[in-house]
């Protein structure tokens, strides 16, 4: 199976190029989302949205905030796991937690998470002796954890509730279930592949040893908790009626999240919201928009403000010559990898 997948990937790379496919896909998703939002929100009652915001129970908002906190707490284990995967287990959890939280909080809001989150990670980890290539490996392993969790949640939830994905995929339930089973089949094949023998990808200093079978299961559990907390936060912000069930919301939420990531829009802005509005047609638009606004405040804006405050305070301590904190390498934050990677490549040659 993996040989066939590699052959298909090589064909697309040689004939079209993955970069072009990615750009076209992102622009297509954004264009469709913009058209959907215009169609669905042109008659939106703004006063109704404010009324729905005021009517949202404070207890539900508090529970949703706790779920968001749980989600970001889970994100800290993305970096903790990645550090152990690349052989840097000496980095303490508190540093992994700082990097995981701030990198995702910043990356979620600015977009291009690989680069923005990578810049934040490099600023933190370089103070503890990690090179740019090691930080790139951390980003890769953390991303792998995220996608393994997404694949598991999407495959299982769509298998249980295949019709929930219908408004997004525009496919009948039985085809959605077949797609979900195919996702699970690929997932189980990957687990078996890494379980059977040590696996590595990349070349020379870029080589990464993939987590083995048991470690991959740990990755999946981390991803499950992350997505579960986030979806539960969204679930708490939806109106109580009609009751659609948590699994249905899970299908919609994960599908919308993946579309948002595929668009590369900051926080999936517009794309995530359009998918939620299309899939959750049962709810009044004003109530659903109010829930989406609250979710964006809790999951995006509040953590972003906290992350900026933490990073800003940390930089002030560096400027004052604080002796407790190790000093990071003086690399430009906008392009943290370029000079380091070129230097290490030249040393290797």
Image (cartoon, helix red, strand yellow):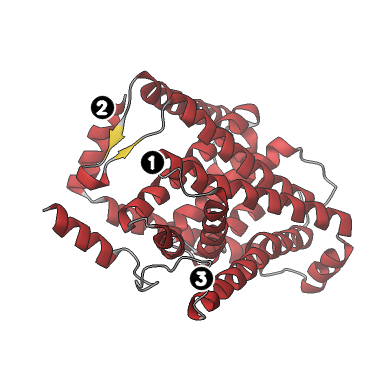
The residue mark sitting in front, 1 or 3, is: 3
- Position above or below: 212 against 56: above
Is any atom of residue 78 visible in this view? yes
The residue at the point 42 percent across, 43 percent down is 141
Question: 36 or 20: nearer the eye?
Answer: 20
* Label number found at residue 272: none
Mark sitting earlier along the chain (2/3):
2
Looking at the image, do the residues carrying marks 2 and 3 touch, with CB atoms under 8 Å apart?
no
According to the picture, the residue beneath numbered tag 2 turns out to be: 3
Q: Is residue 160 left or right of residue 109?
A: right
Q: Quadrant of the N terminus?
A: top left
The residue mark sitting in front, 2 or 1, is: 1
Q: CA distance from mark 2 to mark 3?
A: 53 Å
Near mark 1 (Cα within 10 A), the count class, few <14, some 14-19 or many ≥20, is: few
According to the picture, the residue beneath numbered tag 3 turns out to be: 323
Near mark 2 (Cα within 10 A), the count class, few <14, some 14-19 or many ≥20, is: few
The residue at the point 18 percent across, 56 percent down is 345
- Spot the residue most to the bottom: 320
According to the picture, the residue beneath numbered tag 1 turns out to be: 87
Is any atom of residue 35 visible in this view? no
- Residue 226 lies, in percent from the top left, at 61, 44
- Residue 234 lies, in percent from the top left, at 71, 51
- Residue 113 lies, in percent from the top left, at 46, 59
The residue at the point 21 percent across, 40 percent down is 11
């Amino acid at each position: 199976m993996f040989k066939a997948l590699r052959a298909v990937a090589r064909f697309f790379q040689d004939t079209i190029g993955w970069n072009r496919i990615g750009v076209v896909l992102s622009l297509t998703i954004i264009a469709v989302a913009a058209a959907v939002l215009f169609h669905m929100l042109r008659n939106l009652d703004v006063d109704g949205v404010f009324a729905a915001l005021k009517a949202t129970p404070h207890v539900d908002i508090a529970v949703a905030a706790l779920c968001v906190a749980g989600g970001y707490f889970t994100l800290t284990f993305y970096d903790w796991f990645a550090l152990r995967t690349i052989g840097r287990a000496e980095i303490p959890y508190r540093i992994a937690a700082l990097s995981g939280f701030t990198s995702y909080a910043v990356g979620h809001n600015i977009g291009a998470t690989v680069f923005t989150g990578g810049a934040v990670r490099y600023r933190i980890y370089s103070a503890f002796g990690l090179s740019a290539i090691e930080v790139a490996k951390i980003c890769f392993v953390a991303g792998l954890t995220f996608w393994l969790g997404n694949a598991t949640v999407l495959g299982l939830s769509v298998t249980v509730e295949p019709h929930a994905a219908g408004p997004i995929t525009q496919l009948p339930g039985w085809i959605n279930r077949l797609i979900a089973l195919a996702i699970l089949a690929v997932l189980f094949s990957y687990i078996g592949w890494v379980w059977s023998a040590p696996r590595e990808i990349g070349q020379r200093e870029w080589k990464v040893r993939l987590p083995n079978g048991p470690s991959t299961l740990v990755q999946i559990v981390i991803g499950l908790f992350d997505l579960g907390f986030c979806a539960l936060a969204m679930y708490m912000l939806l109106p109580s009626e009609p009751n659609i069930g948590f699994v249905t919301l899970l299908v919609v939420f994960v599908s919308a999240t993946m579309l948002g990531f595929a668009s590369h829009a900051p926080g999936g802005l517009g794309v995530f919201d359009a998918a939620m509005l299309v899939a959750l047609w049962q709810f009044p638009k004003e109530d659903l928009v109010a829930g989406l606004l609250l979710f964006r405040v809790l999951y995006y804006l509040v953590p972003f403000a906290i992350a900026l405050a933490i990073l800003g305070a940390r930089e002030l301590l560096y400027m004052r010559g604080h002796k407790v904190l190790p000093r990071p390498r003086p690399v430009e934050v906008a392009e943290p990898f370029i000079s380091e990677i070129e230097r290490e490549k030249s040393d290797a040659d």
